[in-house]
Amino acid sequence: MARYKDSVCRLCRREGMKLFLKGERCFTDKCAYDRRSYPPGQHGQRRIKFSDYGIQLREKQKVKRLYGVSERQFRNYFEKADRQKGITGANLLVLLERRLDNAVYRLGFATSRQEARQLVGHSHFMVNGRTLNIPSYLVKPNDVIEVKEKSKGMDRIKEAVEGVARRGIPQWLEMEQSKLKGMVKSWPDREELTTPPIQEQLIVELYSK
């Protein structure tokens, strides 16, 4: 699968807000967006006026980059959300939140979603007692996510857990820090997904054309 391999800080600058793609670095004065909050490129400091389509496209790109999924994956999530009962935009965000790599990040086992995806892919986590290395696996209530015994001594995981207080854990998840174990208490709540701010209705309008 094609992956973005350039500097992820350029993505934050392109979207005009922090997407927290670099983990702890985003909370320091080394953050590229804090130093240069204008879009990358030689024309980045010019004032750009977006059309309605441009605004919708930027919102879609922002969410896609935030969760680190490809265009095809994102389209599949949207189609699945559209088939579900309820509000399509909210359904889309809940599906993205339920990804295993996102749950690992939200529990504090990784400092970024990109790092969480790599840790999951390298089989460092178990779900309900079984090793699972599929980042796109959708967690559900009562699922137990834990670090494998042989991986509990990893410095990357220890450092991430130490900084979890800064990021916080959403209410739909529960964490036992001493055991490096978490549990999915309920479905994700759209009201909790406020950082960064997302206008999912713009994405629905884009795909409805």
Image (cartoon, rainbow, N blue to C red):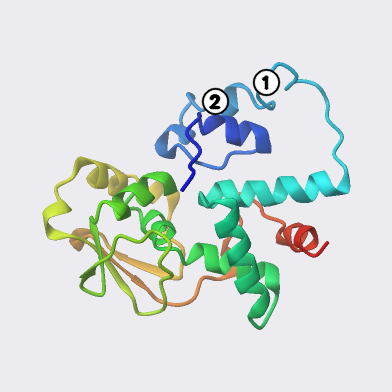
Tag 2 secondary structure = helix
Q: x, y (%) of residue 115?
A: 36, 45
Q: Residue 130 or 161: which is nearer the viewer?
A: 130
Is residue 112 in sight in this rendering?
no
- Residue 41: mark in rendering: 1
Rendered residue at 33%/47% (across/down): 118
Rendered residue at 75%/63% (across/down): 204
Compared to residue 115, the image places residue 131 above or below, namely below
Q: Amino acid at mark 1?
A: Gly
Quadrant position of the C terminus in the picture:
bottom right
Tell which residue pokes out farthest to the left in this image.
150
Is 172 left, or right, of 52 in this rendering?
left
Alpha carbon separation for disc pair 1 and 2: 14 Å
Return the residue at label 2.
32
Is residue 126 in sight in this rendering?
yes
Is 136 left, or right, of 12 in this rendering?
left
Q: x, y (%) of residue 74?
A: 59, 58
Q: x, y (%) of residue 55?
A: 80, 46
Rendered residue at 50%/63% (across/down): 97
- Residue 74: mark in rendering: none
Tag 1 secondary structure = loop
Residue 206 is drawn in which quadrant? bottom right
Tell which residue pokes out farthest to the front in this image.
1
